[in-house]
Amino acid sequence: MRRAWGRGVLVSAGLWLSACSLSPRPPPPSNDIDESVFREGVRALAADDFEGRKPGTPGEQKTVAYLVDQFKKLGLKPAVGDSYLQPVPMVEVAVGADSTLGLEGSGHEIHLGLGKDAVVWTRRETPEVSLANSELVFVGYGIVAPEFNWNDYAGIDVHGKTVLVLVEDPGYGSHDPKTFKGGAMSYYGRWAYKVDEAARQGAAAVLLVHDAEALGFGWNVVESTWGGPQLALGAPLAPAAPAAPARGRAHGKELPAAPAPVAPLPDAPLLEGWVRKETAGTIFAAAGLDFDASAKAAAQPGFKALSTSLRVHATLHDAVRTFTSSNVIAKVPAAGRHSECVIYVAHWDHLGKGRNRSGHDIFNGATENASGVAGLLTLAQSFQRTKPAAEREILFLAATGGEPRPLGSQYYVSNPVVPLRQTAAVFNLDALPRGGPTRNLTIFNPGNTDLEELARAAALLEGREVTADPNPEWGAYYNSDSLVFAAAGVPVLFVRAGLDDSARGPTYGRAQLDDYMHNRYRQPTDQYSDDWDVRGALDDLKLYFDVGNRVARGRRFPRWLPSSEFRVSRRP
């Protein structure tokens, strides 16, 4: 008995000691979306110390250093060899305040005030750009789209001329759902497409007509975005990877086709710019034309470009500099298929410090796009904590030069750290919502890939339904990093919480969006505050995690839908 008692005491003591030794251990880390990480990321990146995060400034140095430090602290590995940084060559051209723009002809002489009536820039790397006696031609929407049987440049030679172009698509102007994509922006509605098409047609200059209702932003955004130094990718830019007949096979299943080689654009126009809609009306009147009637005609099939009696003259004095910016790329290594990846992308940059502004002059960019980058860090933490690791590598790409063109993403697509044919999907984090939970979710530019079905299923689990984009004419998908990857053949998902606020309804949500677009979008007033309601953003991040995690662990690649315009690679 004594011996047995002693053994029992020893066993009981052992269990007691074991329990004591286990109790102080913390629980395993959760892969839940961490609100504190998200808030801290927005707070840091949108702080005045980061000076608006413009590439090529001390603000970039602070931003890049912060991101590298955060990725290291989260335990992510460098994705560019043994570095987190992918160098991106940049050129910056700043137009001098003494630059001029005007028109003359038919007894009229029009001087356009830069900033007041027009905003102009150039991507030519030269100290001076001069335009003289350049005929002004109205080319409607400035679109060449064989699949829509549309060519606004048919029958006219615009070499050396200045083209005046409407924003959006003919479908928007005609309100005809059978024309292009109806009221929704298409690939051809982008302002950047119109500038690049003008270059392909040989135009010396292109002037875009600003339309606040169509674009969703006012003239103040034109001034803040295009009124200062403009960026372009610099030389040398490594050539795009050669096309392959297919993106390969994964476990016996054929993957989507690789992108075709992208033909290089000709030289950029000498001059690019925006003019106010009211200013366009004045110009048309001087040419003996009616702007509204001409714009209406431009939305109809068979439109013919209109030559005018006016000649454009301009002189731009430029300050040119080259520098190297950085994409910041980290990864969670794969458990199995190390040659394949899933990418989460968010551009880290904003507009820097204001020019000739009184008071607060820093474009902090809290929503646009400190929120997206903070979301990138939050998802990085969640995936790093998820065990076992996913079969595919997960890349987190904080891209430079996202405003107003997605330059960092363009450079990555030409120089991917994982071949694009082995990239399963891209998830774009751009301007995460500020506000509470919503009853709905917007999938931007739907009808492209079966990623959308995964998003619908994930939304239902969150108690949300997918509803139509409330502003398809804004072209959020086409004016973001999404297009760059989709045009290169990689399936992309870009979603955002809808406007139907769970507590206060869609009218409240609409009012909040309108307030942001009118008062804070690309303005110094886009600042972070600790009273932000971030529950809607956290819901979106949870959905992005759930869908991305499923793709990273799945056997097949997401598929293009038969109706998708990106099944055949397009030029961004």
Image (cartoon, rainbow, N blue to C red):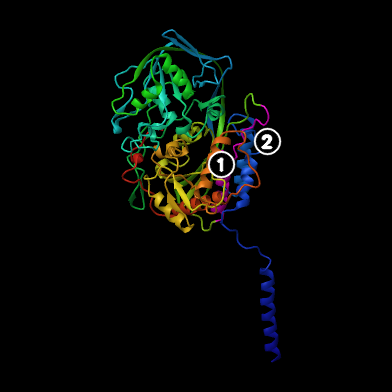
Asked whether residue 163 is in view, the answer is: yes
In this orientation, which residue lies closer to the viewer: 566 or 420? 566
Residue farthest bottom in this picture: 1
Q: Is residue 442 magenta?
A: no
The quadrant in which the C terminus is found is top left
Mark 1 falls on what kind of element? loop
The quadrant in which the N terminus is found is bottom right
Q: Position of residue 540 (x, y in %)?
A: 51, 50
Query: Residue visible at 59% across and 37% down?
Result: 365
Asked whether residue 79 is in view, the answer is: no
Earlier sequence position, callout 1 versus callout 2: 2
Q: Position of residue 355 (x, y in %)?
A: 62, 25
**Disc nearest the viewer among 1 and 2:** 2
Query: Residue visible at 46% across and 52% down?
Result: 547
Q: CA distance from mark 1 to mark 2?
A: 28 Å
Q: Identify the amino acid type marked 1.
A: Asp
Q: Which residue is mark 1?
A: 82
Q: Which residues are magenta?
A: 358-385
With 362 as the anchor, is 380 left or right in this view? Answer: left
Mark 2 falls on what kind of element? helix
Q: Quadrant of residue 201?
A: top left
The reply to whether discs 1 and 2 touch (Cβ–Cβ < 8 Å) is: no
With 70 as the anchor, is 157 left or right in this view? Answer: left
- What label sits on residue 249 in the rendered view? none
Q: Is residue 382 magenta?
A: yes
In this orientation, which residue lies closer to the viewer: 12 or 530? 530
Query: Residue visible at 43% across and 51% down?
Result: 466
In this orientation, which residue lies closer to the viewer: 360 or 564? 360
Q: Identify the amino acid type marked 2.
A: Asp
Q: Would you call the spot at circle 2 few (<14 residues within 10 Å), some (14-19), or many (20 or more)?
A: some
Q: Which residue is mark 2?
A: 49
